[in-house]
Amino acid sequence: MVTRDDYRIDEKPTWCPGCGDYGILNALTRALVEHAIAPHELMIVTGIGCGSKLPQYMRVNGMHTLHGRPWPAAQGAKLANHGMRVMIIHGDGDGYGEGLGHFVHAVRRNPGVTEIVQNNKIYGLTKGQFSPTSEKGWKTSTSPHGSAEDPAQPLALAITHGATFVARGYPGELKHLIWLIGEALEHPGYALVDILQPCVSFNKPRTYDYYAERVYRLEDETGYNPANRTAAWERAQEWGERIPIGIFYRAIPGPTFEMLDPVLKEGAPLVKRPLEKLNSAQVESLLAKLR
């Protein structure tokens, strides 16, 4: 039986008091326990940022990568051991800024990876520059006259490129967020959970109170059908006095990227296959091609 104690370690988070990442860590741990996923069965890959420190604060297989580059490592891990659960956890700057190119191509490949994006609409670790999801006109240290750019629309982008599970959560709605993460973990393909993460130090206008007054659950909307791709795409761009959270889009996915690989189709994950079958002549042949 998996318990929360299995994930607990003595390391204390260095996040600012009140940071939304505390709620995300809490929700993630609870979701993993509810779905009986043990620490040794999971790999969490992160980039650079406040939220990317998350695997340092739990007992789990974790890997930090370069800024915006968790996807190559995560997909490599999944290809090497497709029997392992792989997650990416990072912020909006890492995921939708430096990592946007990886994001788009990962979505269309449909790897069996769950991606959580802690979206605080700011670069928090470097103390408050506008990010790809900052609203137009947003004043920061790098946009003193207001950002001239329209914000990225990552949920709509994911739906456009073929994602079959797209959701948004909010740590102020903890039970709902636990449920969303759990549903994403059980989705048989790529799954995105974008999380509205209050940054209490560098994005003070977007407080817990701000979101609490505006968020509403799509599950409570009469007639909303998450299987309707067009409706999901339109709702994913809704922002303002009402901000939707919940599952925007869910469909039965096709085969995952690793299921389509001819080598992986042959049987056990690569990490469990014997190396004895590879003789010195084969190794030399491979090396010769690289010289």
Image (cartoon, rainbow, N blue to C red):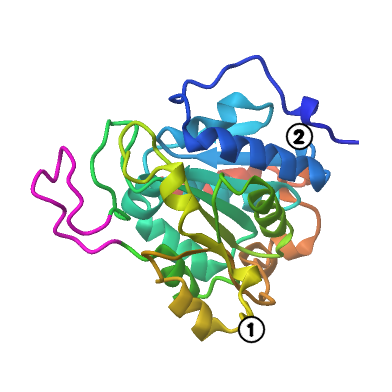
Q: Provide residue 24's location: percent of width, then percent of height.
A: 58, 40
User: In the image as oriented, which residue stretches furthest toward the left?
Assistant: 145
Q: Going 81% across and 59% down the picture, which residue do you hit?
A: 267
Residue 138 magenta-highlighted:
yes
Q: Residue 272 versus residue 191: which sits nearer the camera? A: 191
- Which kind of residue does numbered mark 2 sit on? His
The kind of secondary structure element at disc 1 is loop
Question: In what element is the residue under mark 2?
Answer: helix
Q: Residue furthest top?
A: 10
Which region of the structure is painted magenta?
135-151
Rounded to the nearest angstrom, the CA distance separating label 2 from label 1 is: 41 Å
Residue that carries the numbered disc 2 in the rendered image: 40
Residue beneath disc 1: 223
Residue 285 in sight from this viewpoint: no
Residue 172, percent across and down?
56, 45
Q: Looking at the magenta stretch, what is its main secondary structure?
A: loop
Using the image, determine if residue 252 lies above or below residue 239: below
